[in-house]
Image (cartoon, rainbow, N blue to C red):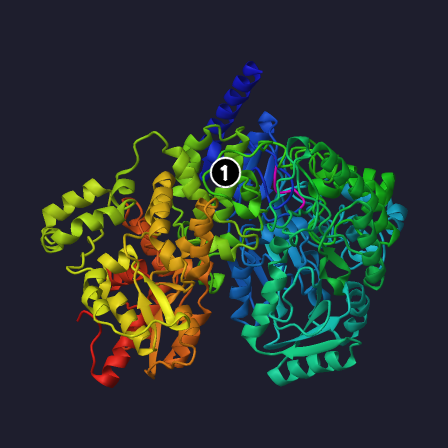
């Protein structure tokens, strides 16, 4: 075995050298690069030899030439969002997302565009949108999926009832075969490999009768019927859906369609999903743009989401030249539909919110409701799911399609088959096309569970065929369904598929195991390499049964974290990917590396892995993925866990000792604040201090407050004579940043809360949320600090009053990190439940109070931790009540506690700020009030723009002072 591993390594090294000699793009055979490409968004895992990011078509040809001579397989890959496993592979993976990603041209007159395979769909839609055009197919991953991947899978999306599949919208393709032939494919036989026309002519009868009819979403197998003379011999169309097994795409000319200037959304409620499915086909006569369906098991809070009455819903989009025309069409559908209830949504923001439910379904459906489903097992079948955590659900029967008129009957039979196998799933999808997506709670960890996965797949394939359907209606067959194609097409037609593949790729070098001569559907499952027992960890992972492996398994690969730039919307995830564009710096990339670390096959260093450390180094611990990831991956926690183990018994970076232990240093420094502040203004001394502390040389050392908040409030609190009433009393948490660095924000908060009639208590002793220790992975110290904090807070917790925390990052740490680190201490849960933000505390303790009317425009940013853990609805209501208008930006400021101060992080920190925060501040103008409740956000603004951001409490206190002429406590 050792000899074989040595031989494999030497062969990889020789292959890498040969590729580096021929290719101008990046060639990476390192463990990290290979680990990032082992998986897509499916249940499968295949380990490549290396990864090449070609710079152009010549590079693609060079890679194929080197690999052909050495007999090495090649797998083309876009965003890696494929759900059937076809974007995984052995040999060399071609990553088109790095360089070959351009929209080369848009011709509005011809309504076409020329794109490279790595072009992201939304970038094409942006370019076409300037001319009132769009690309019709739009999978839910439109913000990150690539045109090459869409062509490879013949992707569809929610608008296929109006504009068809990708194959319907492709005009010409430039491809390179494994043998090195450069072909241009369009209509007619030009560019066809030798022998293809003869293959079609010799099998006309089989091709005319072997494909199911009346099925708008037939994606399974090869589209050989596109080569029939009566179908126009469309070679480009036949190539679509080839899943990278025929040739490698280097350029595509695609069709564009007119995008209606106005759109409306008719939302129809039905008793159950079968009723909705049976109604869907009847709505097609209205020529809608979409007919999407989902049931209440995917949307449990239907009323809160603004959905009409019912147990299942259809989303029916209409278009028009004007808003009135689009609305009239939607109202016509609501009136004519036999639905329990219905509504029309014309507000763009309301439509986006509803569509977000549907687009996130590929992720949210992977978590079953609490108490449902079959929990996956470790060795011996021991359940791993904790009470209240919900079960895991996976693709595997992800997107079959039946004739739309058969959809209701199929869904009833499908639900019955699930119950027969003791499984649960959450169907949703393109009801107007008869295409259903579903995640099922397969147990893919135990041998018995995998056997059930196979038997269910075989039986449901028969059910789909019985209803006249296709095993795949959108995502392709890949490794998940190709083995079952004979059940749909019969052995003779599947044999013809193999001959078709051989004409393009006689050596079988492109994506082996997919479509033709397929691998078994229960081979190469991605979980089989994970440890069968929970690993020893510090956090509790209560939503994952205390199992770090289960936490890492949360990432199913839908790659919402790979969205680039402000198009990501108001969310936060993933700032480091948006700054670098590199997979290893996305939430998914980091989760993949952690998965491979646990597997120990590619990433072999365990907790000491340098590959994982390198990927996590640029994680800002912003917690954005905790809320923005559809399955709640919490990379900030995983990073803290990794750092804890990685540096156990080892010397840490200087920044961990300096900034990671900031609370203790600031307590020691407080009596000497004046001297230290003066020293920080002496450039040589500041340079030495920054170098010793691991601080980036570009950063200014923050000023320490001469008088802490606690000292400012000491006399004020002692002079109070009011009687405390429980319902109007709150504890003010003197966090380290407010106490030692910005006490003016704390004093302002006291002014506002007292003006609102609140009574304030302070902890009688040292308290700390442990944030800096957690973010640097010093978890033993964090636990000690938090236990001491709980001892101090216990008498105040007994009062049962809210604890108001002004610094959002500290509030988030108390809300999430505290109970997950000290799950064995009931006081931790009590303190966590007591935490309130400034605005939440005002709403609870002074619900009738109204702030001063300021009537000012504001700009700034909602703190990333507040967005992810706490929510900002109360802050938004408070700003509105005070007449503070304007929308705070999303994203992360980029400073993120110690991250932006650390040496080596400055450029990424600035890039994160330039993503959303700084452009929004510049656009707001000099007269805008800059709001930033987080100390990091205020510091980043001041150091990068010279402008001072303020806590909302400061702005309100200033308004109160202007109205009364009074000053705050301690002034």
SS of the residue under disc 1 = helix
Location of the C terminus by quadrant is: bottom left
Picture quadrant of residue 809: bottom left
- Mark 1 = which residue? 594
- Viewer-nearest residue: 443 or 288: 443
Mark 1 neighbour density, 10 Å: few (under 14) some (14–19) many (20 or more): many
Location of the N terminus by quadrant is: top right
Name the magenta segment's main secondary structure.
Answer: loop
In the rendered image, is residue 301 in sight? yes
Image check: 332 left or right of 869? right
Bounds of the magenta span? 84-89
> In the image, what residue occupies the spot 59% across and 54% down?
147
Please provide percent x and percent y for residue 207. Answer: 85, 48
Picture quadrant of residue 839: bottom left
- Viewer-nearest residue: 674 or 268: 674
Please provide percent x and percent y for residue 76. Answer: 59, 42
């Amino acid at each position: 075995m050792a000899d074989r591993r040595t031989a494999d390594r030497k062969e990889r090294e020789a292959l890498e050298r040969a590729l580096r000699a021929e290719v101008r793009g990046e060639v990476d055979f390192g463990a990290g690069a290979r680990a990032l490409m082992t998986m897509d968004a499916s249940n499968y895992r295949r380990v490549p030899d290396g990864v090449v990011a070609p710079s152009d078509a010549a590079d693609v040809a060079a890679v194929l030439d080197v690999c052909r001579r050495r007999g090495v397989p090649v797998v083309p890959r876009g965003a890696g969002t494929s759900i059937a496993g076809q974007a995984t592979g052995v040999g060399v993976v071609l990553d088109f997302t790095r360089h070959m990603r351009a929209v080369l041209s848009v011709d509005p007159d011809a309504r076409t565009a020329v794109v490279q395979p790595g072009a992201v769909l939304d970038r094409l839609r942006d370019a076409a949108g300037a001319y009132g055009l769009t690309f019709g197919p739009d999978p839910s991953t439109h913000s990150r999926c690539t045109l090459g991947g869409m062509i490879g899978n013949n992707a569809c999306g929610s608008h296929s009832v109006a504009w068809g599949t990708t194959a319907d919208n492709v005009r010409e393709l430039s491809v390179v075969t494994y043998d090195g032939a450069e072909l241009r494919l369009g209509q007619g036989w030009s560019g066809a490999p030798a022998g293809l026309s003869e293959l079609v002519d010799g099998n006309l009868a089989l091709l005319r009768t072997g494909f199911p009819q009346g099925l708008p979403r037939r994606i399974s197998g090869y589209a050989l019927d596109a080569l029939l003379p009566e179908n126009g011999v469309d070679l480009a169309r036949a190539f679509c859906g080839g899943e990278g097994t025929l040739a490698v795409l280097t350029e595509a000319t695609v069709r564009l369609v007119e995008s209606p200037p106005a759109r409306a959304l008719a939302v129809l409620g039905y008793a159950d999903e079968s009723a909705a499915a049976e109604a869907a086909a009847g709505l097609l006569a209205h020529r809608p743009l979409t007919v999407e369906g989902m049931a209440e098991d995917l949307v449990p809070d239907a009323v809160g989401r603004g959905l009409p009455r019912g147990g299942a819903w259809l989303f029916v989009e209409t278009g028009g030249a004007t808003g009135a025309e689009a609305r009239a069409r939607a109202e016509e559908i609501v009136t004519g539909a036999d639905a329990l209830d219905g509504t029309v949504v014309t507000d763009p923001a309301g439509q986006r919110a509803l569509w977000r439910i549907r687009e996130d379904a590929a992720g949210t459906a992977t978590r079953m409701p609490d108490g449902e489903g079959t929990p996956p097992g470790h060795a011996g079948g021991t359940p791993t799911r904790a009470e209240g955590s919900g079960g895991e659900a996976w693709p595997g029967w992800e997107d079959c399609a039946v004739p739309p008129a058969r959809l209701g009957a199929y869904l009833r039979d499908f639900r019955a088959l699930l119950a027969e196998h003791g499984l649960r799933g959450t169907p949703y999808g393109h009801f107007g096309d008869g295409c259903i997506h579903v995640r099922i709670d397969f147990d893919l960890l135990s041998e018995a569970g995998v056997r059930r996965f196979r038997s269910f797949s075989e039986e449901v394939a028969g059910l789909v065929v019985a209803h006249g359907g296709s095993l795949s209606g959108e995502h392709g067959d890949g490794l998940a369904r190709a083995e079952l194609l004979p059940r749909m097409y019969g052995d003779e037609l599947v044999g013809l598929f193999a001959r078709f593949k051989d004409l393009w790729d006689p050596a079988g070098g492109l994506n082996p195991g997919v479509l033709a001569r397929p691998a078994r559907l229960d081979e190469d499952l991605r979980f089989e390499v994970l440890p069968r027992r929970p690993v020893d960890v510090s956090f509790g992972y209560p939503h994952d049964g205390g199992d770090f492996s289960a936490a890492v398994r949360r990432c199913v690969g839908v790659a919402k974290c790979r969205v680039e730039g402000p198009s990501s919307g108001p969310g936060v995830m993933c700032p480091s990917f948006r700054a670098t564009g590199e997979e290893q710096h996305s939430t998914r990339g980091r989760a993949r590396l952690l998965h491979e670390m646990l597997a120990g096959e590619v990433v072999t260093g365990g907790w000491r892995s340098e590959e994982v450390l390198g990927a996590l180094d640029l994680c800002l611990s912003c917690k954005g993925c905790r809320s923005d990831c559809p399955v709640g991956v919490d990379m900030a926690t995983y990073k803290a866990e990794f750092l804890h183990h990685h540096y156990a018994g080892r010397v840490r970076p200087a920044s961990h000792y300096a900034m990671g232990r900031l609370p203790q240093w600031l307590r020691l420094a407080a009596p000497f604040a004046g001297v230290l502040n003066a020293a920080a203004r002496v450039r040589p001394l500041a340079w030495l201090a920054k170098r010793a502390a691991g601080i980036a040389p570009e950063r200014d050392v923050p000023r320490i407050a001469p008088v802490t908040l606690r000292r400012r409030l000491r006399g004020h609190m002692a002079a109070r004579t009011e009687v405390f009433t429980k319902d109007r009393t709150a504890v003010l948490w003197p966090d380290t940043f407010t106490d030692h660095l910005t006490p003016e924000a704390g004093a302002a908060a006291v002014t506002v809360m007292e003006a609102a009639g609140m009574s304030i208590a302070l902890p009688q002793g040292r308290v700390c949320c442990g944030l800096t220790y957690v973010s640097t992975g010093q978890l033993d110290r964090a636990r000690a600090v938090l236990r001491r904090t709980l001892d101090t807070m216990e008498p105040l917790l007994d009062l049962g009053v809210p604890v108001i925390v002004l610094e959002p990052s500290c509030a988030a740490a108390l809300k999430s990190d505290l109970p997950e680190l000290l799950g064995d201490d009931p006081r931790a849960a009590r303190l966590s439940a007591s935490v309130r933000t400034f605005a939440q505390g005002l709403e609870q303790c002074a619900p009738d109070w109204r702030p001063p009317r300021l009537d000012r425009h504001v700009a700034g940013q909602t703190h990333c931790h507040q967005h992810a853990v706490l929510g900002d609805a109360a802050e938004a209501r408070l700003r509105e009540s005070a007449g503070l208008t304007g929308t705070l930006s999303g994203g992360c400021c980029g400073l993120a506690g110690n991250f932006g101060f650390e040496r080596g992080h400055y450029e990424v920190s600035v890039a994160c700020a330039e993503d959303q925060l700084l452009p929004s501040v510049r656009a707001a103008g000099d007269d805008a009030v800059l709001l930033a409740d987080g100390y990091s956000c205020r510091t980043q603004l001041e150091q990068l723009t010279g402008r001072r951001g303020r806590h909302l409490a400061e702005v309100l206190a200033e308004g109160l002072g202007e109205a009364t002429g009074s000053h705050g406590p301690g002034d």
